[in-house]
Amino acid sequence: MTESKTPRRRVLSGIQPSGRMHLGNYLGAVQQWVQAQEEKEGLYCVVDLHAITVYQDPEELEEQVRGTAALLLACGIDPEKSVLFVQSHVRAHSEAAWILNCQTPLGWLERMTQFKSKAANKERASAGLLTYPVLQAADILLYDADEVPVGDDQRQHLELARDIAGRFNHLYGETFVLPEPVIRKFGARIMAFDNPTAKMSKSSGDAQGHAVALTDEDAKIRKTIKRAVTDSGREIVFSEDPEKAGVNNLLTIYKLLTGKDQEAVLKDFAEARGYGDLKKAVAEAVVESIRPIRERYERLMGDPAELDRLLAVGADRARALAEPKIIQIKERVGLTVPAALR
Ligand code: AQP
């Protein structure tokens, strides 16, 4: 008797090559991607089309794309198990984004909080910043992704992707899978070390003491964490109290990097003499986790031809999945697809 095999769930997520990848990206997103690829079908992309919604130096962008891909591999994305590719290498993303743009009410986009905060100056903000979440919906819907592991800042965009899919299915018939956001309870929002009420982000990543980048040397990591803002108390507890945000952030990072549960984490600090001891232990956990990533990254960056080869293979595999879907999407809305494009 042949055993019937349930198809593996498909997971898709992306990261912008817009700056130095940091601990927040790793703990909120990439660590989950690495874990997911063991049981699920993973597709992970470097979303360069998203990055150009704000100005990027053209020469630097090329290096950033390679660097981001190398970091994903260094973190444990295995190109044998997962599809790793660059968004702009698969044209269907841009085509699907345009078609979905034409189906998305403007009001839905104007309500996005990320747009509101990034596009305060409407004379300077690009139209791409407004339609950014539609491109993100296209990235996901093109591959019929079941799950999208992201940080908490992407929650609203993912709801929008579901709304866009639902509206399209309603107007043109069942076409898209409604993707589920996968957002961790711990690590969904790693906070900045210099301001634990703000999320750690690439765009502020160069500010002294803001973030730990995955390429930082041991001494720099120790210095950043030693200077992390905490509070004037002494209590080492997980807490949602904004006053304790700094301590909570340090404990969360420690928990995720050591794989311990909350109780075991608190036990490790039962004898601590103050926040100095906490910071030292967190810094060591971060150093030990980042060192092998940084070393693998340096090796990978030393062989750009091999990196490009891996990305070419990933793009071919992604194209093979995206091409039939973009044909289906075009046909649904009444666009003819000539034989040469099939
Ligand atoms: N601080 C964070 N904590 C947890 N998850 C995070 N992510 C980002 N920051 C945190 C998640 O990382 C994935 C890639 O996101 P991104 O490329 O948009 O990274 P970013 O650091 O948010 O980049 P920017 O350019 O600096 O964006 P802004 O200016 O918006 O902060 C996503 O899954 C994201 O949720």
Image: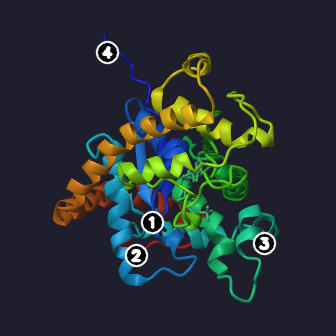
Secondary structure beneath label 1? loop
Q: Which residue is mark 4?
A: 2
Left or right of 151 on screen, residue 7: left
Residue 113: image quadrant is: bottom right
Secondary structure beneath label 4? loop
User: In the image, residue 62 lies at what x, y percent?
Assistant: 35, 74
Residue at left offset 45%, top offset 47%: 222
Lower position in the chain sequence, tag 4 or tag 3: 4
Question: Which quarter of the rendered picture does the C terminus lie within?
Answer: bottom left
Q: Are marks 1 and 2 in contact (CB under 8 Å)?
A: yes
Lower position in the chain sequence, tag 2 or tag 3: 2
Give the amino acid type for the residue marked by disc 1 in the picture: Pro
Residue extending furthest toward the bottom: 123
Lower position in the chain sequence, tag 4 or tag 2: 4
**Few, some or many residues within 10 Å of mark 1 (<14, 14–19, 20+):** many
Q: Are marks 4 and 1 in contact (CB under 8 Å)?
A: no
Q: Which residue is mark 2?
A: 61
Secondary structure beneath label 3? helix
Q: Which residue is mark 1?
A: 17
